[in-house]
Amino acid sequence: MSPLKRIAYFVGLPIVLIVLWYALSFGSTNFFVPKPIELAQTLWTTWIGDRFFEDVLPSLGRLAVGLFFAIGLGIVLGLLIGSTRWLRNLLEPLLEFFRAIPPPVLVPLLMLLIGVNDSMKVAVIISGAIWPVLLNTVEGVRAVDSVLNDSCRSYGIAGFARIRYFVLPAVTPQIMAGVRQSLSIGLILMVISEMFASSSGLGFTIVQFQRNFAIPEMWSGIVVLGLIGLGLAIIFQFVERRVLHWYHGLKEITHDS
Amino acid sequence: MRKQRSAAAGPKAKALGLGIGGIILFFLIWEAAPRLGLVSDRYLPPASEVLARLGQYLTEAAFWKDVADTMTSWALGLFIATVAAIVVGLIIGSSRFLRRATHTTIEFLRPIPSVALIPLAVLIFGTSIESTLLLVVYASFWQVLLQLLYGIADVDAVANDTAKSYGLGRLARVRYVIWPTALPYLMTGLRLAAAVALILAITAELIIGTPGLGKQIALTQSGGAISSMYALVLATGMIGVLINLGARIIEKRVLSWHPSVRGEVVL
């Protein structure tokens, strides 16, 4: 495919949609529907400046800390639980139950236990985002190739080396699949924790706009959240490509043959 | 293999026993922590108190009304999202041009967190059930659509060409070639969407205040009825477990012909 055609495919539909939006909202005085240019201006004036440092950055910071601990703890605990059979049997039904609890209900619960502060919001993100990583890691450790496992054992590879060179690479595809789910859950929880109990942050600000009927500002907030989601997805894809390049390569080869 | 299978009955029973033991252990710790004063029982009431409250809830009509409200928005939202995603997915998936042209738009819209739509839902629908539906449909639509598109992309080119040269029309190919290939992916999408739909249904009730279990949790929390709140949280967890189990059973039923499921049975 020629590069020109590729670009056309890439931007074609978005341009058509924006033009359509522009045309349809041109003469409209509908209070709820923003116009494209107006929205772009509002986006700029509302979010660039003080608000960026007071609301957006702290929100992103909490999200980053929460996700870091959720993923880290998820992998470590997952490796531990997955490689100890009795521990796995002991905890599996319990973990299934915890995963099934819709994470947003933990917001009022943790508010009570920790109080309304930053650590509560981080705890909410951790307590919701840890499950996909944890359970996928457990599942992955359980499904490691038994031949490779026996080979490791007969070569006397044990302890840390076994985890570093055999278990961890083997479960990385599963871990990454879990991380992908964790990212979106983490983002949702960041917003909810701020909507429910906060006086700052992205979620709070957007709800505030809506309550004051500041409609263009509200829409611009939705766009900001969308951009953050998109940014996370792009970062994830980049990291996944790097971490799992061997895996994608392997899959391509086995598909070809 | 055979040896493992015959030995499996013993360890399986043992695993089940350990699992039940784990649950009992968890409740014992929960019971002990507030009783020993490790956590104030104003914030974490003992397990027995919460379980008793849950048992009491189970006899109350108001509780079942809340459950019915939550499950209605869950089921309705999931149904609308699935039908919409299947229609859109089959249309986009059947043409290379559409697949390529919609790629960026889908990749852009998909990561938008559905909770970003909460203010919009409040503005348009207020605290009626449509608010919940908007969030549930938006969130579960992408889960199903993406899996379906992956599935359609996985269709064997040779099988498709064979069907073409045997004179199968477009519709027949969708029915006999594309649909069976995409079905396992679709079921995965449905399973994910079922869990996500519950999360969003509860979220909407919690934040917006549409009727249902989530609203009740927010009310009990602000009213200081702490053991009631814990009981309701347990109830949502149980609904989640039931949904996960149900989705897995349906997946197995629908895909009983598929190697991935057949394989599990043989092992």
Image (spheres, coloured by chain):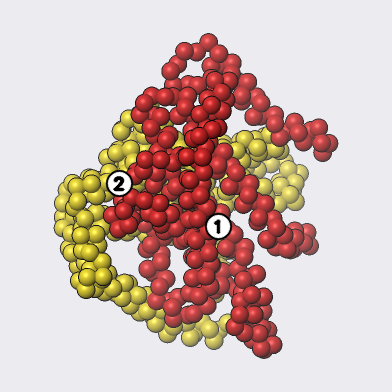
Q: Chain of mark 2?
A: B
Same chain for mark 2 and mark 1? The answer is: no
Q: Determine the secondary structure under disc 1.
A: helix
Residue B49 located left or right of residue B147: left
According to the picture, the residue beneath numbered tag 1 turns out to be: A179
The quadrant of the rendering that contains the C terminus of chain A is bottom right
Image quarter (top left, top right, bottom left or bottom right) of the N terminus of chain A: top right
How packed mark 1 is, by other alpha carbons closer than 10 Å (few <14, some 14-19, many 20 or more), is: many
Percent coordinates x, y for residue A129 in the rendering: 47, 56
Question: Which amino acid, mark 1?
Answer: Val
Q: Amino acid at mark 2?
A: Gly
Q: In the rendering, what colour is chain B?
A: yellow
Q: Which residue is mark 2?
A: B214
Could you say where residue B67 lies in the image, as x and y percent from the top left? 27, 48
Assess disc 2: are there few (<14), some (14-19) or many (≥20) residues with their C-alpha within 10 Å of its C-alpha. Answer: many
Residue beneath the point at 73% across and 63% down = A246
Q: Which chain is red?
A: A
Determine if residue B116 is in view.
yes
